[in-house]
Image (cartoon, rainbow, N blue to C red):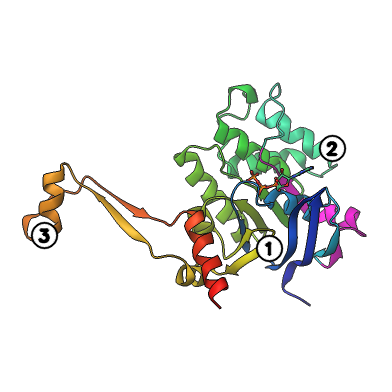
Amino acid sequence: MTDNMIVVSDLKKSFKINRVLRNVTFTVRKGSIFALLGSNGAGKTTVVKILSTLMKPDSGNVTINGLDVVRQGYYVRECISLTGQFTAVDEVLTGRENLNLIGQLKRLNGVKNKVNEWLSFFHLQDAADRKVSTYSGGMRRRLDIAMSLMGKPQIIFLDEPTTGLDPQNRIAMWDLVKELAVGGTTVFLTTQYLEEAEYLADYIAILHGGKILAEGTPQYLKTIMPHRGAQLNFQSEEQAAEAMALLNENGITIESFEQKLPSLEDVFLALTDEKGGK
Ligand SMILES: Nc1ncnc2c1ncn2[C@@H]1O[C@H](COP(=O)(O)OP(=O)(O)OP(=O)(O)O)[C@@H](O)[C@H]1O
């Protein structure tokens, strides 16, 4: 019995002359949070579409839960759910009605209890009977994920789950994703944010130039990425200059403190340099 939920090998996909996926290979362990990290247009959604049976690859193999996505698509769809970048909720219905509808379409038993369970898990009880048109972006996104979880899929694909969310909603979404994995769901997410991948994922694969440029645990990737600095913002330039020399002794107030992460571009450059140098 293998521990791998997803096995992707030598995946290729082109759109006419645009070779988006040249050779993509990775595995995802059962019950883990896996992040596919890449910048705009890297091909993340294309990977998600192929893995979720919405698009056929040109070549390569993909199995999910031991099932081939091309030949056994029907069975693959039984064990996955997909939440895309644009929410699929019905604006005219309430949150509860949206969830009920999905429960009925999927012919689930005990829909009422399941709806209440997910409303509470996603902190939507208070808004449950309001029309979705009155929901914030974060609430819609949470409802969308709740809808895709009706029926308890073993694996959930979250395509850029926090794009467009404000910092507060982004953090709330991170907490929910962690809780999902604690509950045993395998989470496959795509993101263009390094900090999101580092915070959430057990394992990160960086997609760049149609290939997996680097992969590993966040701890491992930190060791091969560019150095991180810290940015200290003082009240005035004078204070900053003074502080540089006398920070500890003079007790100068630091207005704010930000950790500086390398940009994705810095990461790509460092990693491609490293590979080129080998
Ligand atoms: N159906 C399609 N027909 C033609 N080109 C496509 C199609 N789908 C994707 N592409 C192209 O493939 C490339 C990768 O797109 P994809 O949406 O997979 O990237 P992404 O990493 O998800 O980007 P983003 O972060 O912006 O969503 C882009 O150049 C895009 O224009």
Separation (CA) of disc 3 from disc 1: 46 Å
Residue under label 2, please give it.
Answer: 105
Q: Which residues are magenta?
A: 66-85
The reply to whether callout 3 and callout 1 are in contact (CB within 8 Å) is no
First of labels 2, 3 by sequence position: 2
Residue under label 3, please give it.
Answer: 245
Local SS, label 1: strand
Q: Residue 92 in the image: x percent, y percent?
A: 70, 21
> Circle 1: is it few (<14), some (14-19), or many (20+) Cα within 10 Å?
many
Q: Which quadrant: the N terminus?
A: bottom right
Local SS, label 3: helix
- Residue 72 figure quarter: bottom right
The type of residue carrying mark 2 is Leu
Separation (CA) of disc 2 from disc 3: 67 Å
Residue 17 versus residue 139 in the image, above or below: below
The type of residue carrying mark 3 is Ala
The yes-or-no answer for disc 3 within 8 Å of ligand 1 is: no
Between residue 168 and residue 131, name the one nearer to us.
168
Identify the residue shown where x is 84% and y is 37%: 105
Identify the disc placed on residue 211: 1
Identify the residue shown where x is 59% and y is 50%: 39
Tell whether position 51 is magenta: no
Q: Which quadrant: the C terminus?
A: bottom right
Tell whether position 73 is magenta: yes
Asked if residue 152 can be seen in this view, the reply is no
- Would residue 117 be found to the left or right of residue 249 on screen? right
